[in-house]
Image (cartoon, helix red, strand yellow):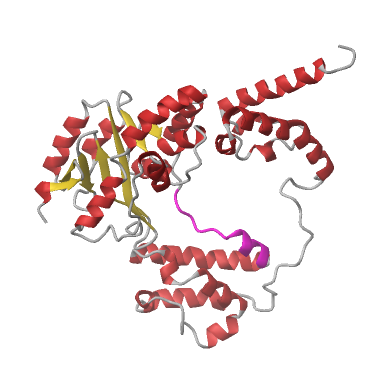
């Protein structure tokens, strides 16, 4: 493959796979007004952790495919990403921003096309559907789960990766016009600002809600202990934890420790794990310490609503009728159903308490709620027979 003559339609593609090319690209990007970017990564699929494998950038003329496997240190690019005068355009950028922050970069002046599309009341829920709707372009998504660790990349992978960025600048321009017409530009600015402020969260083993409902508190502790050991072993072997042994297999072991202890490791464990005797001993010791006289079943308890003890359903319904439903109806009327779905997400629960706590609300949500509910109250007063 001749990497000097890669092209996607009319868009030339450059592969950046050494420090010299990276430095030249960083210098060029420092003088542009905006660029789009995307990442390809592995998140607990083929190895342990959240690993950046590819960084794609489009400056409006050329697509740059930065090989993060060949170039371990991407720091020359970070000043460009952190430059507030340069707009960085993404689609559904939370994981991309998270990944860059893990690498020591805090992007500034980010524009998320997915958020803008939703707030402009567009119904398309994916990038491929948005492209087809707006430009009539159909993307081949067969490489979505491609192995981005393997080198060299093939031509199909490179074209696929470039397609994720070369249309974003035009989409941003179009959506900015729509946003002004629909009076949601301020909403989009705040959402993009919140994206910049988002914090990374390290992976930590935890029990699922189903496991919490299924197992006794004692067995929850033991299952979590097995999860913690599995996680440490997976980190040492650079494997996703589920490839060491599945959650289901660990649950079955806890339900019947006697059978496992009598004939351990006969199924469900990876060969890499089984080749390490010290890991097997450690795992077996934990299972042997489980008290099998304690029933693993969680006692059946009356379900307590997430709102806590003393929850009054009638009062909640009254508050929803008073606050949430008129608010939702007006938001739909003003901005459309798709935009409303985004704007009011999660607010029904926050409006079901007697006292409203605005701490977790977005500023534009607070202003919109106060404006709409104030309007509803004003209308109610005007309809009063004494007026």
Q: Is residue 231 above or below residue 51?
A: below
Residue 54 showing in the rendered view = no
Residue depicted at 46% across the width and 22% down the height: 180
- Quarter occupied by residue 75: top left
Residue depicted at 68% across the width and 32% down the height: 329
- Quarter occupied by residue 235: bottom left
Magenta segment: does it hold 182?
A: no
Residue 313 showing in the rendered view = yes
In-image side of 31 versus 352 (left or right): left
In-image side of 137 versus 321 (left or right): left
Expressed as whole percent of the image width and height from the top left, the position of residue 127 reads: 40, 45
Between 267 and 175, the one nearer to me in the picture: 175
Q: Is residue 272 above or below residue 83?
A: below
* Range shown magenta: 202-214
Residue depicted at 67% across the width and 73% down the height: 296
Expressed as whole percent of the image width and height from the top left, the position of residue 286 reads: 53, 73
């Amino acid at each position: 493959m001749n990497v000097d003559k890669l092209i996607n339609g009319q868009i030339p593609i450059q592969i950046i796979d050494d420090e010299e090319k990276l430095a030249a690209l960083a210098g060029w990007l420092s003088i542009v007004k905006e660029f789009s970017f995307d990442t390809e990564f592995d998140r607990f699929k083929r190895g342990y952790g959240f690993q950046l494998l590819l960084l794609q950038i489009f400056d409006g003329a050329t697509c740059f495919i930065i090989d993060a496997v060949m170039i371990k240190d991407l720091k020359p690019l970070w000043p460009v990403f952190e430059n507030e005068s340069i707009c960085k355009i993404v689609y559904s950028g939370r994981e991309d921003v998270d990944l860059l922050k893990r690498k020591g970069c805090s992007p500034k002046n980010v524009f998320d096309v997915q958020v803008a599309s939703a707030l402009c009341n567009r119904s398309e829920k994916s990038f491929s559907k948005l492209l087809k709707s707006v430009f009539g372009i159909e993307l081949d998504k067969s490489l979505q789960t491609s192995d981005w660790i393997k080198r060299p990349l093939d031509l199909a992978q490179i074209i696929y990766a470039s397609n994720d960025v070369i249309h974003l600048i035009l989409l941003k321009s179009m959506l900015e016009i729509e946003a002004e017409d629909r009076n949601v530009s301020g909403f989009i600015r705040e959402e993009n600002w919140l994206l910049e402020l988002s914090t990374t969260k390290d992976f930590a083993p935890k029990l699922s809600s189903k496991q919490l409902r299924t197992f006794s508190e004692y067995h929850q502790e033991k299952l979590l202990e097995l999860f913690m050991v599995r996680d440490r072993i997976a980190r040492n072997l650079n494997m996703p934890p589920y490839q060491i042994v599945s959650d289901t297999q660990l649950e079955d072991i806890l339900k019947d420790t006697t059978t496992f202890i009598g004939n351990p490791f006969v199924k469900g464990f990876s060969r890499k794990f089984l080749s390490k005797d010290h890991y097997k001993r450690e795992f077996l010791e934990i299972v042997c310490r489980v008290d099998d006289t304690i029933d693993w079943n969680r006692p059946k308890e009356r379900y307590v609503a997430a709102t806590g003890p003393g929850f009054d359903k009638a009062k909640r319904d009254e508050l929803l009728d008073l606050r949430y439903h008129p608010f939702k109806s007006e938001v739909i009327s003003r901005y459309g159903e798709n935009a409303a779905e985004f704007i009011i997400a999660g607010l029904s629960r926050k409006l079901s308490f007697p006292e409203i706590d605005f701490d977790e609300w977005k500023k534009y949500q607070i202003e919109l709620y106060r404006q709409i509910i104030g309007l509803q109250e004003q209308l109610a007063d005007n309809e009063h027979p004494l007026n």
